[in-house]
Amino acid sequence: MDPQVLAQSVTLDGLPDDLAEALIKVARMRPIKAGAAVFEAGDPADGFYALIEGSLRVILRGEEGEQVLALLSPGAIFGEMALFDGEPRSASIVATKASRLAFFDKHAVYRFADENPAVYRHMLCIVGRRLRASNASLAARSLLPLTGRVAQTILHLSDLFGKTVGEDRILVHHKISQADLAAMVGAARENVSRVLNDWKREGYITRISGYYCIEDAAALRALASL
């Protein structure tokens, strides 16, 4: 395992260098093929992961198919609640393309953290950030109109996968269907499609080779503001 790669992971951000280097030693690298599941909802929670390379979808499966809850980009961590509640996985994680993960077995982390309590504090900070993000998402769904929720989601995707392609232009370098985007927004696909078509006419976004490109980020940020 390349220590430099893991040391740059969000998982270790904020830990003292010596603890970060030691924690790296308990991680195991796991490759995963495109379309394969890292784990399924209901699986035992045996540890947490850091996404090193590739991209993943967080999904719920039901009788009517899959619903995409979120997309994960390199640096993301997931499954960290396994360290605290011992409950089964609450959602499924599937690779959208070939990816590399670092897996941290919870028992190995417990042994290390028992000797280095700063690790527990760090993981609590990660959980706290996750809860704040969840609360912000719930607030947006309650208080923002549809245009604001779509804008917020597009901007979030640009944070994850954005590439600058010109002055004030950001290409969201990850193909996402309108159905998946609508699921992330929490609205009907047809309604989200109308918003996107309006924005194309207004020059807020364009489509380049199947990718969304933000042409007017300021306009989207204004729409996304509570």
Image (cartoon, rainbow, N blue to C red):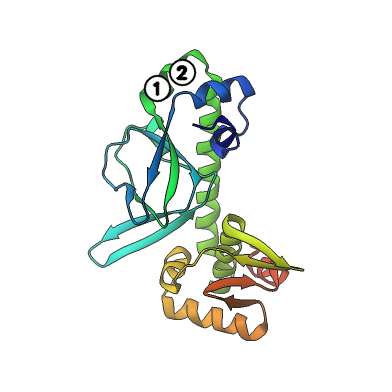
Q: Nearer the viewer, residue 63 or 30?
A: 30
Q: Is residue 144 visible?
A: no
Q: Nearer the viewer, residue 9 or 99?
A: 99
Give the quadrant of residue 7.
top right
SS for dot 1: helix
Horizontal relation, residue 79 to residue 169: left or right: left
Give the quadrant of residue 183.
bottom left
Where does residue 31 sit, x and y in percent of width and height? 39, 43
Mark 2 lies on residue: 112
Q: Nearer the viewer, residue 2 or 21?
A: 2
Where does residue 73 sit, x and y in percent of width and height? 52, 51
Mark 1 lies on residue: 108
On screen, residue 128 above or below 68: above
Mark 1: which amino acid?
Ala
Distance (Cα) linking label 1 and label 2: 6 Å
Q: Residue at x 32, y 52 (%)?
A: 36
Mark 2 Cα shell of 10 Å, populated few (<14), some (14-19), many (≥20): some
Mark 2: which amino acid?
Phe
On screen, residue 118 above or below 223: above
Evaluate if marks 1 and 2 touch, with contact meaning CB atoms under 8 Å apart: yes
Instruction: Give the position of the C terminus as an image quadrant.
Output: bottom right
